[in-house]
Image (cartoon, rainbow, N blue to C red):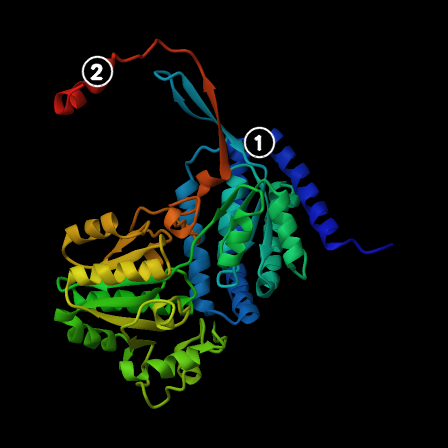
Amino acid sequence: MPLKTDIEQVDQIISRARKAQAEFEINGSQELYDKAAQAVGWAIMEPSRNKELAELAVSSTGLGNVIDKITKNHRKTLGLLRDIANIKTFGVVDENPDKGLTKIARAIGVIGAVVPSTNPIATPANNIINAVKCGNAIILSPSPKGVIGCARLLGYIHSEFSKADINPDLVQMIPAPGTKDKTQRMLEKTDLVIVTGSQNNVRRAYTSGTPAIGVGAGNVTVIIDETSDLIIAAKKISASKTFDNATSCSSENSLIIVDAIYDKFIQALASVGGSTLPQSMENHIIDRLWENGHLSRHAIAQDARTLIDALDLKGDVPENTKFICIETQGIGEAYPLSGEKLSRVIALYRASDFDDAIMKSKKMLEHSGAGHSIGIHTNNTNRAKKMAMTLPTCRVIVNQAHCFATGGSFNNGLPFSLSMGCGSWGGNSIDENLHWKHFLNITNIVCEIPVVEPLVEDIFSDYWSSVGK
């Protein structure tokens, strides 16, 4: 019997997903959708499985570290399940008699999701939970290095589905080996595609002809101003930058430090493991952090010791170094340190004052990371508002460890997510954290109500009094 072609394989998977989704929706209820979401959550959060999945993620991709991935898998999933616990996603979700409107939640159908190697377990779990919570089936296309971990995750999900009498065909993946042709077929034939990862994949999704949600590139810049608590800021930056070896798109990539506290803040960074190198070593770092124009696999998402070896810094930094800070000035294509580094390396910039820091931040975002997020450590509450009003960003993170805060946290109000929409600035269709509502269609029942029609003068009276008729 001849082997199925790549396209036939994908078509068969999509066909099974469509059948399973139709049955899931026809027999649907809020209780069923919630049970499916909780089954996926427990599949990844059960401690022994979480540990195994984290170990697989690190061993297969070579990125991050096991302890932090365990934490990420647990907290991101727990936070998401908290967020959606009381959300209605089946049947009537809102009634407004005054407007004669009743909103009915409807599943989208079959979701296609492209997931990155940096978060090969937490990101697909997040997408799967949102998908089934809203009555959908989902098909994953993992990165080549993430195939093993994704397959193991799906095995655990199917085991939980078996206990809950839920069809395993609701959650599938493109079979290995992954190819561009297989992924492209999935992009073209599913009902909605969700893409987290390379901007090339995001562009392919937006041009696939299928409704798409892609997220923009991260290149987080954080301002430290003269009013901030320097030690607290340094501790939060250290915790964020080192978490999972900076695999997060929300890890700090550049710090813009107001000149009045620059030297003191360098000392604060040193106290938490940040070793600062002078600008004279800028080319030394660039030559080793990038190889032939691409980030070096020997340096990205590695622990401190491995990074120090890869950057040839033995003897140049203290033994207790947790991350590298390199002083620099240039911003733009000709200055690689002003971009995303996906490693425990932070570029340091001086600003004469807060206004200068704003100008440098704007230039940084326009170069890379527009729309994603920016941070500030300050005790002046008005400064975050100025940043939000003037910079091309969808999030201003205030006095927080950036990578923990941007994707939702138990101490802020953002939804838990691993995919941050960047709005029009980042070339995205959403400007908020990807969450459950992006996995739903809403049907409106529209009933007649008493006429509500204003007089012309009710609308224009203020305008006429200001400029005349």
Is disc 1 surrounded by few (<14), some (14 to 19) or many (20+) residues within 10 Å?
some
**Which residue appears at 25% of the width and 49% of the height?**
388
Q: Would you say residue 139 is visible in this rendering?
A: yes
Q: Amino acid at mark 1?
A: Gly
**What residue would you read off at disc 1?**
28
**What residue would you read off at disc 2?**
458
Alpha-carbon span between mark 1 and mark 2: 47 Å
Horizontal and vertical percent position of residue 429: 44, 44
- The extreme top residue here reads 450
- Tell me: residue 216, above or below residue 300: above
Q: Are marks 1 and 2 in contact (CB under 8 Å)?
A: no
Please report whichever mark, 1 or 2, sits nearer to the chain's N-terminal start: 1
**From the image, which quarter does the C terminus lie in?**
top left
**From the image, which quarter does the N terminus lie in?**
bottom right
98 or 260, which is in the foreground? 260
158 or 188, which is in the foreground? 188
Is disc 2 surrounded by few (<14), some (14 to 19) or many (20+) residues within 10 Å?
few
Horizontal and vertical percent position of residue 345: 36, 73
Q: On the image, which quarter does residue 242 sit in?
A: bottom left
**Which residue appears at 39% of the width and 59% of the height?**
218
Horizontal and vertical percent position of residue 440: 49, 36
Mark 2 residue element: helix
Q: Amino acid at mark 2?
A: Asp
Q: Would you say residue 307 is visible in this rendering?
A: no
Q: Is residue 287 left or right of residue 40?
A: left
Number of numbered markers: 2
- Tell me: residue 323, above or below residue 389: below
Q: On the image, which quarter does residue 32 sit in?
A: top right
- The extreme front residue here reads 469
